[in-house]
């Protein structure tokens, strides 16, 4: 996906790309990996968006659709490796620092 389009935008932004794992890993800590994350889980929202893209309820450019489906078109049982990931586990702290930076 080409993220350069966001560089000219006039709004605060920050991008974290981790070396492994798909979107929606939450904290990817040991608690999450054991299934103790409560409901509704964030991936449910992703699945709903993907369903809407597939059934054309949400219009998106074909390039975006292909990328979204490549990343998210799987069931909860498929392609979703459930394991703790120390690298991804810190994203919440990164988001907190970023929000403090832009809102003080």
Image (spheres, grey):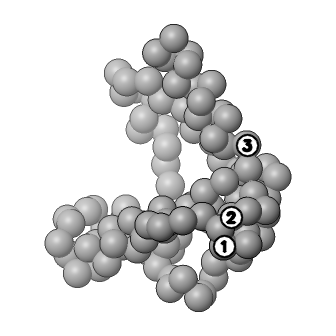
Q: State which tag comes first along the sequence, 1 or 3.
A: 1
Q: Answer few, some or many: residues within 10 Å of disc 1's Cα (few below 14, many 20 plus, some between 14 and 19).
A: few
Residue at the top extreme?
104
Badge 3 element:
loop
Tell me the residue at 59%/34% (across/down).
95
Residue 36 visible in the snapshot: yes
Quadrant hosting residue 69 = bottom left
Q: Are marks 2 and 1 in contact (CB under 8 Å)?
A: yes
88 over 61 or under it: above or below: above
- Label ID, residue 35: 1
Q: Could you say where residue 82 lies in the image, as x and y percent from the top left? A: 71, 74
Question: Looking at the image, which is closer to me, 18 or 81?
Answer: 81
Badge 2 element:
helix
Callout in the foreground (1, 3): 1
Q: Are marks 1 and 3 in contact (CB under 8 Å)?
A: no
92 over 51 or under it: above or below: above
Disc 2/disc 1 C-alpha distance (Å): 5 Å
Disc 3/disc 2 C-alpha distance (Å): 13 Å
- Label ID, residue 32: 2
Q: Which residue is mark 3?
A: 90
Q: Could you say where residue 78 lies in the image, as x and y percent from the top left? A: 60, 87
Question: Looking at the image, which is closer to me, 67 or 98?
Answer: 98
Tell me the residue at 54%/83% (across/down).
76
Q: Could you say where residue 75 lies in the image, as x and y percent from the top left? A: 50, 85
Badge 1 element:
loop
């Amino acid at each position: 996906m080409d993220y350069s389009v966001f560089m000219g935008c006039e709004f605060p932004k920050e991008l974290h790309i981790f070396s492994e794992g798909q979107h929606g890993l939450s904290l990817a800590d040991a608690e999450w990996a054991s299934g103790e994350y409560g409901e509704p889980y964030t991936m449910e929202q992703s699945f709903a968006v993907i369903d809407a893209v597939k059934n054309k309820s949400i219009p998106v450019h074909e390039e975006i659709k292909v990328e979204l489906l490549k990343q998210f078109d799987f069931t909860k049982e498929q392609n979703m490796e459930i394991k703790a990931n120390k690298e991804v586990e810190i994203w919440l702290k990164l988001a907190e620092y970023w929000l403090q930076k832009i809102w003080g």
